[in-house]
Image: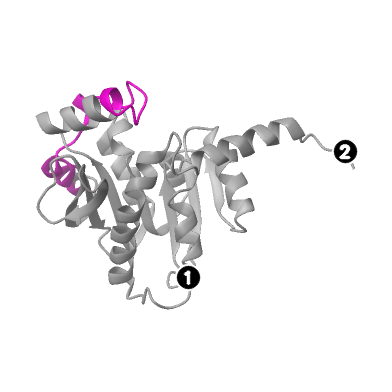
Amino acid sequence: MTTTVDASEIAKFEAMAAEWWDPHGKFKPLHMMNPVRLDYITSQIAAEFDRDLTGPQPFAGLRIMDIGCGGGLLSEPMARLGADVVGVDAAERNIPVARTHAAQSGLQIDYRHTTAEAMAAAGERFDVVLNMEVVEHVSDPLAYLTACRQLLKPGGLHICSTINRNPKSFAVAIVGAEYVMRWLPKGTHEWAKFITPDELYELMRQAGLEPVDRKGFVFNPVSWAWSVSDRDLSVNYVTAALNPA
């Protein structure tokens, strides 16, 4: 049987997949933040859908969408917890990387190169939409969040993280992360597109969502670790909202 697969191209993707999943490589900041992101996400899903996180595959039966999935750093843990996961990314090159790593990990994840708007228009619906570090990169946050709400079933859960807009976030997320630490390529973020927690709550309400929680993700340079904070939303923060039933 003939095939159009180019072994050398597959090898390139595998090499990129290794880079995405290297905790000491280019994506080290995401790896460092991922445990606190996962703690927040899993606790919110467990509370909303009455799931026991100590049991085997506690998210079985739940359909979860991971928008801006990248290499699959959130999609894979959701799949391991038993969820039916669809990972979506507008960056086409991320999809083969994510698919390669999922296959290497023995996980079934539906990765697609598409957008939230296209998925909503196609009638796709989910119990949970994970919308992590995406809203600060879109051209029309309200239209984007409206599409996210349309993707949710009635009573569905929307989890959205982003970066606050204030002098501290400029110093930390742009000067610190991009120029001093060089964790991110210069120009990754535009400070003017950052969104304050109150602004995000209002945008979500306009989109038809019901905000129910918000927390901060705080980096401690002494312990070199992230934690979840009830009070400090000054730079990175996360929100939970419901699509009213």
Quarter of the figure with residue 38 = bottom left
* Rendered-image quadrant of the C terminus: bottom left
Tell me which label, 1 or 2, sits earlier in the chain. Answer: 2
Question: What's the residue type where badge 1 is placed?
Answer: Gly
Q: Residue furthest front?
A: 222
Residue occupying image coordinates x 60% and y 39%: 96
Q: Secondary structure at mark 1?
A: loop
> Left or right of 73: which side holds 7?
right
Q: Position of residue 217 (x, y in %)?
A: 22, 48
Q: Position of residue 212 (x, y in %)?
A: 18, 59
> Left or right of 164: which side holds 14?
right
Kindly identify which residue carries mark 1. 61
In the depicted structure, whether residue 41 falls above or below residue 19: below
* Rendered-image quadrant of the N terminus: top right
Start-end of magenta stretch: 178-205
Q: Which mark is residue 2?
A: 2
**Residue sitting nearer the eye, 199 or 169:** 169
> Left or right of 24: which side holds 17?
right
